């Protein structure tokens, strides 16, 4: 019985070169982390904390926060941080305290965000509007009609005129013709 011929990478073949390059990249990264561990033990220990993400999640949110008008995401990270603060930092109290009214407003806003997320996922699941909002030209009219129908239903859930304006503003698929 003949065995299939399997070509082995030759000494200077592109496959071997790519493999060597990957091995070198891995060795460089490993060397970097080992050096980091030896040179800065406190930083290394911090990277290994079980709650590292709770401590660091709010930080990248600050970049461009006002330009994006995304106070909700920052508030969500701060609320999460406040909840776990005493487990994370034992010696310093949390720098701020959310009032009961602020917490209620946040909870209501969270409900709205979740409802909006559910609607957007439904549009995607029904093959009406994909998550990114980009549709092919031949599907534009159907997607636009579905978008407008769901958008109006979402806005009509608002309890006041100011809430309706907010709901209209946060709807993710703004039709360019609107």
Image (cartoon, grey):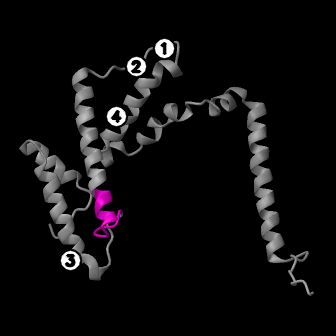
Give the residue at the far front of this rendering.
Answer: 1
How far is mark 1 from mark 2, CA to CA?
A: 8 Å
Q: Which quarter of the image is occupied by the N terminus?
A: bottom right
| Mark 4 or 1, nearer chain start | 4
How far is mark 4 from mark 1, CA to CA?
A: 20 Å
Q: Residues within 10 Å of mark 1 (few under 14, many from 20)?
A: few
Whether residues under marks 1 and 2 lie with C-beta atoms below 8 angstroms apart, the answer is: yes
| Mark 4 or 3, nearer chain start | 4
Q: Please tell me whether mark 4 or mark 2 is closer to you in this view.
A: 4
Whether residues under marks 4 and 2 lie with C-beta atoms below 8 angstroms apart, the answer is: no
Whether residues under marks 2 and 3 lie with C-beta atoms below 8 angstroms apart, the answer is: no
Where 75 falls versus 168 (above or below)? above
Which residue is disc 2 drawn over?
95
Q: What residue appears at the point 68 percent right and 26 percent down from the top-left corner?
A: 42
Which residue is disc 3 drawn over?
141
Q: What residue appears at the point 48 percent right and 18 percent down from the top-left corner?
A: 86
**Is residue 176 in view?**
no
């Amino acid at each position: 019985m003949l065995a299939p011929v399997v070509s082995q990478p030759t000494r200077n073949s592109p496959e071997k070169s790519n493999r060597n390059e990957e091995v070198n990249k891995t060795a460089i990264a490993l060397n970097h982390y080992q050096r980091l561990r030896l040179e800065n033990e406190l930083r290394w220990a911090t990277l290994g904390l079980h709650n590292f993400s709770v401590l660091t999640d709010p930080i990248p949110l600050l970049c461009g926060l006002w330009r994006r008008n995304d106070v909700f995401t920052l508030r969500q990270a701060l609320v999460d941080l406040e909840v776990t603060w005493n487990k994370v930092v034992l010696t310093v109290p949390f720098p701020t305290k959310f009032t009961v009214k602020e917490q209620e407003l946040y909870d209501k806003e969270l409900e709205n965000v979740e409802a909006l997320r559910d609607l957007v996922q439904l549009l995607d699941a029904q093959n009406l509007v994909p998550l990114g909002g980009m549709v092919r030209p031949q599907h534009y009219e159907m997607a636009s009609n579905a978008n407008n129908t769901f958008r109006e239903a979402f806005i009509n859930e608002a309890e006041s005129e100011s809430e309706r304006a907010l709901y209209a503003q946060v709807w993710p698929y703004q039709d360019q013709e609107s």
